[in-house]
Image (cartoon, rainbow, N blue to C red):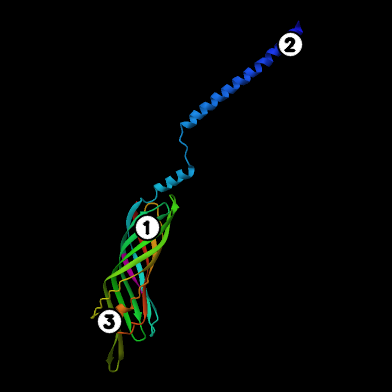
Amino acid sequence: MKDIKIIGIMVLALLSMPLVRVSGQVKDTKLQEKLDDVKAQFVEFDTERLLDSLDQENLPRLVSGGLFAGANMSNFIITRNHRPMSSYMRIGAELGGFIDFRLSKHFSIQPQVILSAQENYFATTDTTNHLWSFGMDIPVYFLGRFGNMQQGYVQFGGGIFTHFTLASNVANKYRSYDVDPGLGTDQTDGYDYSRLYTLHNNHFGVCVTVGYECTFGMQINLQYKISLSDIAGFYSEMKGQEIANALIFPQCISLCVGYRWK
């Protein structure tokens, strides 16, 4: 009798095992459905896209602008001249503004308008001339911009520019002697500004820039411009044919501090 009870219990246990297994599977299925419902309530996001959007918030707007001012140094590159000629840099000043069209996170197009006062000396074997000019530069830069919100942005690029001379003055150096018997001869050097030359040396060329922009908009830029136009013909009125056969190309280096309104 006892053996029959034991056998009955074993049979019932074997029969109940599939039911327990089915019940567990049903619970697992319901749990998975609940997890799927919870996931569906959240929007999946791309971490890289999220970081990129956060970085974009601190970049300039698609269209932004600013002002800058600084100092420049300019002279001439002189070649193919039949007489020795030299050109020496002097310090000038400039003031300008820009509009920045941001194409993407890293690239933009930036036209500028600059009022520029330039000064230099150029000399031959027997004469030295002092040149002062006031004009307007219009460069267009294609810029790359790299950085992050915490450290600011480095920008660099190149482009083309054109220069319009609005006013100019060239003075010839003179040397006078004051002879005083018994005291010797006093020599005086100076520049004759009694005659003004209007030198409309408009030209165009290429330009490059490199700079750094702080996160709050302050920036510092170093620019270099060199003309592709030979301006020697514009100076032939001053010395006849003396420099007409030379090739003269203006160049200018400037260091400016500016601010961009973001």
Separation of disc 1 and disc 2 at Cα? 90 Å
Q: Which comes sooner in the sequence, label 1 or label 3?
A: 1
**Residue depicted at x 71% and y 10%:** 8
Placement of 93 over or under 32, stated as above or below: below
Separation of disc 3 and disc 2 at Cα? 129 Å
In the foreground, 128 or 110: 110
> Looking at numbered disc 1 in the image, what kind of residue is underneath it?
Ile
Q: Which residue does the numbered mark 2 point to in the structure image?
A: 7
Q: Which residue does the numbered mark 1 point to in the structure image?
A: 109
Placement of 50 over or under 28, stated as above or below: below
> Looking at numbered disc 2 in the image, what kind of residue is underneath it?
Ile
Numbered tag placed on residue 186 in the rendering: none
| Residue 152 x/y as whole percent | 42, 53
Residue 169 visible somewhere in the drawing: yes
Stretch in magenta: 89-94
Magenta highlight: main SS: strand
**Secondary structure category for the residue under label 1:** strand
**Secondary structure category for the residue under label 3:** helix
Q: Which comes sooner in the sequence, label 1 or label 2?
A: 2
